[in-house]
């Protein structure tokens, strides 16, 4: 099992420039304070999803399409893919936001809320699980393909470049691990998330290098047989 020190060491390498903690916490807190699916809540959820997708930065770029002020600091928002735009549009639907608020206030069970979250996109479980996180960040950690690679490696299974979570059961398994580490190591979900994100990125690069080496070797061997 991974040690507390390994997670902390990785956590200290987390790139807070690309994924601003201030931006994330600011809008997460506003979601927590929200009581109805008004324009304020819609903006908060939209900004958090764009943050999760890596589309929020303090540096203005050619791809910037909008800007947001947080505590006198300007954040620039970039355009995302049509599929993600569609997912965001569904996430901001009034019925989905009401469900999120009901879930946040413990009026809607998790099993019922994930039906709404799952409806956001059928292409991946990653964005729907983040939708769950938005409304209950202290109970449900962030999951993406990088942290999932770490989970898979910790369970002594092979990790490939295309290893990704695809089922809600995968998210539940990951949540169980994070809860265990929070209890045994005394870390927050966010500390675990940051540490796993860094470790997952390192693992992803390692796997990519290994797969490229194998691919190049197969090509070289094939040339020898011509």
Image (cartoon, grey):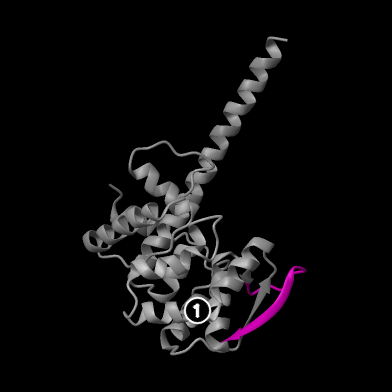
The C terminus, quarter of image: top right
Q: Residue at x 49, y 73 (%)?
A: 21
The answer to whether 1 is drawn above or below residue 207 in the figure is below
Task: Where is residue 154? Give x, y as percent.
Answer: 34, 44
Front-lying residue, 159 or 136? 136
* Residue 68 forms part of the magenta stretch: yes
Q: Nearer the viewer, residue 206 or 125?
A: 125
Count of picture labels = 1
**Side of 112 relative to 79 (left or right):** left
- Seen from the viewer's position, the closer of residues 93 and 186 is 93
Q: Is residue 77 left or right of residue 166?
A: right
Crowding near the residue tagged with mark 1, few <14, some 14–19, many ≥20 C-alpha atoms within 10 Å: few
Q: Quadrant of residue 32?
A: bottom left
- Residue 204 in the magenta stretch? The answer is no
Residue 81 can be seen, yes or no: no
The front one of 56 and 126 is 126
Where residue 120 sits in the image (x, y, percent)?
53, 66
**Residue corresponding to mark 1:** 95
Name the residue rendered at 63%, 71% in the picture: 57
Q: Position of residue 89 (x, y in %)?
A: 61, 73
Q: Secondary structure at mark 1?
A: helix
| Quarter of the image where one finds residue 59 | bottom right
Q: Which residues are magenta?
A: 57-71
Q: Is residue 196 visible?
A: yes
Where 90 falls versus 218 (above or below)? below
Name the spot of residue 147 as percent of width and height, x first.
44, 53
């Amino acid at each position: 099992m991974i040690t507390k020190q390994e997670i902390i060491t990785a956590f200290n390498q987390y790139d807070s420039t690309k994924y601003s903690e201030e931006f994330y916490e600011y809008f997460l807190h506003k979601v927590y304070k929200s009581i109805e699916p008004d324009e304020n809540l819609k903006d908060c959820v939209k900004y958090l999803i764009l943050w999760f997708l890596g589309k929020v930065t303090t540096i203005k770029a050619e791809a910037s399409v909008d800007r947001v002020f947080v505590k006198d600091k300007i954040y620039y928002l970039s355009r995302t893919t049509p599929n993600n735009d569609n997912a965001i549009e569904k996430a901001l639907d009034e019925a989905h936001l009401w469900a999120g608020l009901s879930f946040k206030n413990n009026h809607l069970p998790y099993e019922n809320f994930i039906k709404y979250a799952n409806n956001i996109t059928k292409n991946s479980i990653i964005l729907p699980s983040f939708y769950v996180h938005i409304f209950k960040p202290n109970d449900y950690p962030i999951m993406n393909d990088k942290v999932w690679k770490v989970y898979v490696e910790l369970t002594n299974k092979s990790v490939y470049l295309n290893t990704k979570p695809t089922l809600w059961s995968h998210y539940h398994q990951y949540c169980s691990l994070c809860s265990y580490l929070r209890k045994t190591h005394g870390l927050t979900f966010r500390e675990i998330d940051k540490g796993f994100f860094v470790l997952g990125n390192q693992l992803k690069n390692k796997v990519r290098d290994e797969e490229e080496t194998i691919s190049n070797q197969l090509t070289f061997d094939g040339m020898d047989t011509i």
